[in-house]
Image (cartoon, helix red, strand yellow):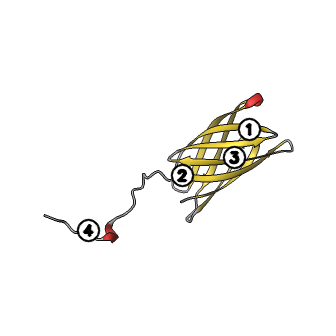
Amino acid sequence: MFVAIESSQIAPVSAQLVPEPWVTVGSKNGTVSYGVGVKIFDLGAEITNSGGTTGVDVLKFFGFPLVSPYAGLGIYGDKGVAYSGGVQITPPGNTFFGVGYHSIRGINGQVGIKF
C-alpha cells in the first residue's frame, strides 16, 4: 500500500539547526569594541575585541515571538569575568537587530542575518 504526498504538504522542521550570525560594535569610556556572534536555538556565543583584549561570551536567550532578551557571562584575559544583558528584536524578514550592555564593552549594538 502506497500513500501519495503532494510536495506542497511537506514543510521544513522548525527545530533544524539554523545558526543566526551577527556583528556587534560597542563603546565604553572612549574604547571601541567589535566582534561577531552566533545564536543556535536559545544559546549564543560572541567573540569580541575591546581595547586590544579579546574575549568570549556565552549567552542565554529567552525566545519570544519578536523579542529575545538575553543574559551572558564572558572571560576577557587580564580584564577578568564580564557580564552582559540585552535584547534582540526579530522583525519579519531576514535581518534582526539588538542592543545590550556589557560590563567591559559598554553599550553595544548588533545586526544579524536569519537563514
Residue hosting label 3: 100
- Mark closer to the chain start, 1 or 3: 1
Q: Are marks 1 and 4 in contact (CB under 8 Å)?
A: no
The residue most toward the left is 1
Of 97 and 3, the residue lying toward us:
3
Q: Nearer the viewer, mark 1 or mark 3?
A: 1
3D distance between C-alphas at marks 4 and 3: 46 Å
Q: Amino acid at mark 2?
A: Pro
Q: Is residue 97 above or below residue 40?
A: below
Residues packed near mark 1 inside 10 Å, few (<14), some (14 to 19) or many (20 plus): some
- Mark closer to the chain start, 1 or 4: 4
Residue hosting label 2: 19
3D distance between C-alphas at marks 3 and 2: 20 Å
Mark 4 residue element: loop
Residue hosting label 1: 54
Residue for point 58% across, 58% down:
90
Residue for point 34% across, 71% down:
8
Percent of width and height locating residue 2: 16, 65
Q: Nearer the viewer, mark 4 or mark 3?
A: 4
3D distance between C-alphas at marks 1 and 3: 18 Å
Q: Are marks 4 and 3 in contact (CB under 8 Å)?
A: no
Q: Is residue 115 above or below residue 36?
A: below
Residue hosting label 4: 5
Q: Is residue 51 left or right of residue 42?
A: right
Q: Amino acid at mark 3?
A: Gly
Residues packed near mark 4 inside 10 Å, few (<14), some (14 to 19) or many (20 plus): few
- Mark closer to the chain start, 4 or 2: 4
Q: Are marks 1 and 3 in contact (CB under 8 Å)?
A: no
